[in-house]
């Protein structure tokens, strides 16, 4: 496979805007399907995949997350900011469920133990089983330190093999909180002309999640309803999707075809498009592209949900690490972060420098 270079396209948003289309600013996670769809897609992608065992491990993790999310919906027991707290955060320009520096409901540790128990029945040997055993024995202080490291993007001291499981618990809790926040907003209904039309406001930095301040995993073009072809960034922690027009860099906000380009894997093992014009057409039909920015040297993947209806941001990102490896060869840095697969050196560097794919093998095995 090779990288097919530089397909420059008219953003679909621009087409929609010209047609007078309306774009929903957010897409919210659905409690009954959110992690189940991820698990299903991971199982599908695992067939014959070089990282098949790891994808199946994350699928089992997603199934446990789905069960935890549904249980949280029945039992509650996790604090959710009220309307006044959301307004205060909004006025301060901060996300209402700030992951890095906000308070964290200790209930997440109960979610973690629930997920570990569910996985222990399936994962009985290998590094993943050892990581689960470590988590089972771990005390609250250790677990909180792991969560702090993960949510602040610090690799130092992180148990890399246990990190996907810790992250899974945090994702389940944050996703639950977002769903409840949206539900409370909708329950309040229209309360006069001054009422907020959306549960949360947009942040100045459109490259991070407006609900929790985390970076996106990837972006995804959504089809159906009023989202036809619109591109949304998918939060790595809480699952919120927020709109950012295609052709605009998620890292620095630059736009314009002289700065933004699209790279994709050429599955035909073909030549670069200057050598073979057909490669360019194939790249324009690829399910996943890397949207690269020459202004800041970063990139974010774009998953084409309108070309592959079952595409799921976390699953399709994990299954296309080859694209990251090839883009890394061009010197571009990844803006997206996938908590299921962190790269870096737990003895040193900060994740901001270390999330780019490198030599570290993924944890996993089933
Ligand atoms: Zn978020
Ligand atoms: Zn940029």
Image (cartoon, rainbow, N blue to C red):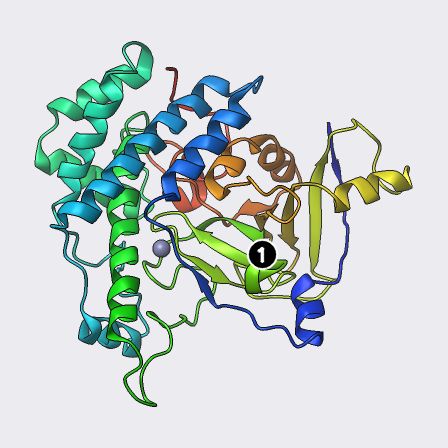
Residue 327 visible? The answer is: yes
Asked if residue 280 is positioned above or below residue 185 in the image, the reply reads above
* Residue position for label 1: 224
Mark 1 CB lies closer than 8 A to ligand 1: no
Residue 57 coordinates in the image, percent (x, y): 38, 23
Residue at the extreme top of the image, as rendered: 125
Asked if residue 288 is positioned above or below residue 158 in the image, the reply reads below
Residue 323 coordinates in the image, percent (x, y): 62, 35
Residue 141 coordinates in the image, percent (x, y): 10, 37
Asked if residue 322 is positioned above or below residue 151 in the image, the reply reads above
- Viewer-closest of 281 and 134: 281
Residue 343 visible? The answer is: no
Secondary element at tag 1: loop
Residue at position x 65%, y 61% in the image: 247
Quadrant location of the N terminus?
A: top right
Residue at position x 63%, y 58% in the image: 229
Quadrant location of the C terminus?
A: top left
Horizontal side of 315 relative to 254 (left or right) equals: left
Count the numbered circles shown: 1
């Amino acid at each position: 496979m090779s990288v097919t270079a530089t397909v420059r396209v008219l953003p679909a948003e621009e087409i929609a805007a010209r047609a007078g289309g309306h774009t929903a600013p957010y897409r919210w996670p659905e409690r009954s399907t959110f992690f189940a769809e991820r698990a299903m897609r991971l199982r599908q992608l695992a067939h014959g995949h070089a990282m098949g065992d790891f994808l199946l491990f994350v699928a089992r993790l997603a199934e446990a997350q789905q069960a935890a999310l549904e249980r949280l919906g029945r039992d509650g027991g996790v604090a959710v900011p009220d309307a006044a707290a959301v307004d205060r955060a909004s006025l301060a320009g901060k996300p209402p469920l700030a992951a890095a520096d906000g308070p964290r409901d200790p209930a997440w540790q109960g979610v973690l133990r629930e997920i570990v128990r569910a996985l222990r029945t399936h994962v009985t040997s290998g590094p993943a089983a050892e990581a689960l055993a470590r988590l089972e024995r771990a005390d609250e202080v250790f677990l909180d330190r792991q969560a702090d490291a993960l949510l602040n993007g610090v690799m130092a001291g992180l148990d890399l093999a246990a990190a996907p499981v810790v992250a899974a618990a945090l994702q389940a809790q944050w996703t639950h909180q977002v769903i409840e926040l949206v539900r409370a907003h909708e329950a309040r209904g229209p309360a006069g002309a001054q009422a907020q039309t959306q549960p949360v406001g947009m942040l100045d930095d459109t490259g991070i999640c407006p609900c929790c301040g985390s970076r996106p995993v990837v972006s995804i073009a959504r089809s159906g309803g009023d989202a036809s072809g619109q591109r949304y960034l998918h939060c790595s922690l809480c699952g919120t999707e927020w709109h950012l027009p295609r052709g605009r860099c998620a890292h620095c906000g630059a736009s314009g075809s002289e700065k933004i380009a699209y790279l994709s894997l050429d599955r035909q093992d073909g030549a670069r498009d200057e050598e073979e014009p057909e490669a360019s057409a194939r790249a324009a039909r690829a399910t996943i592209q890397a949207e690269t920015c020459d202004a800041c040297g970063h990139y974010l993947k774009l998953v084409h949900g309108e070309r592959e209806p079952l595409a799921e941001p976390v699953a399709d990102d994990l299954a296309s690490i080859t694209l990251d490896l090839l883009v890394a060869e061009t010197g571009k840095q990844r803006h997206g972060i996938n908590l299921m697969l962190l790269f870096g050196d737990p003895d040193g560097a900060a994740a901001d420098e270390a999330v780019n794919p490198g030599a570290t093998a993924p944890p996993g095995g089933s």
